[in-house]
Image (tube, rainbow, N blue to C red):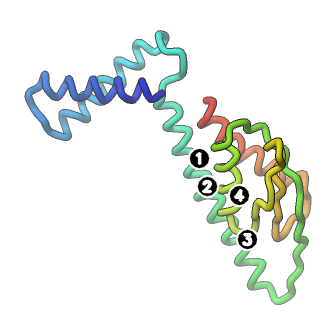
Amino acid sequence: MAFQILLNVFIAVVWMFMSSSLTATTFIIGFLIGLGLLFVTRRFFTSRLYIWRLWAAIKLVLLFFKELTLSNISVLMLVIRPKLNIQPSIFALPTELEHDWEITLLASLITLTPGTLVLHVSNDQRTLYIHAIDVEDVDEAIDSIKNSFEKAILEVSRG
């Protein structure tokens, strides 16, 4: 992926010199030309085009902001209720993530989302222990995390 980005920037710089114009507009045009050339020659690369991973990372950020907003509203509704009727829970989340940075990112996203907190990661790094402020169904909470954050992280890292 890094090679593709550097190649694209190199093509953009070469385009700037060939055009004899050292402006941002010329660089952007060269970058788009480089992206087109990378797309045409994509079968010669061993990995997918970096633009797809970039798009997956943007989707992950948007997913986090959506979950952040929804969980803030949920916690706010819990706080303003006259009667505190919650079911706090600690549960184990088995994960398919393998790399340290993937597990750290998942733990950070869960912890940054209000109402949830990662308490511990198992020694084999296959299970995260999570505290949630209000959980009606543990299996549903596990499926929600696996189908949102974990799936998006896998798309970024291995997509």
Foreground residue among 66 and 57: 57
Mark 4 / mark 1, whichever is N-terminal: 1
Residue named by callout 2: 64
Q: How many marks?
A: 4
* The label number, if any, that marks residue 110 in the structure image: 4
Mark 4 / mark 2, whichever is N-terminal: 2
Q: Are marks 1 and 2 in contact (CB under 8 Å)?
A: yes
Q: Amino acid at mark 4?
A: Ile
Q: Are marks 4 and 1 in contact (CB under 8 Å)?
A: no
**Residue depth check, mark 4 versus mark 3: number of the one nearer the observer:** 4
Residue named by callout 1: 60
Q: Residue 82's image quarter? A: bottom right
Q: Secondary structure at mark 1?
A: helix
Q: Is residue 78 left or right of residue 28?
A: right
Residue located farthest toward the left when viewing the structure as drawn = 20
**Residue depth check, mark 1 versus mark 3: number of the one nearer the observer:** 1
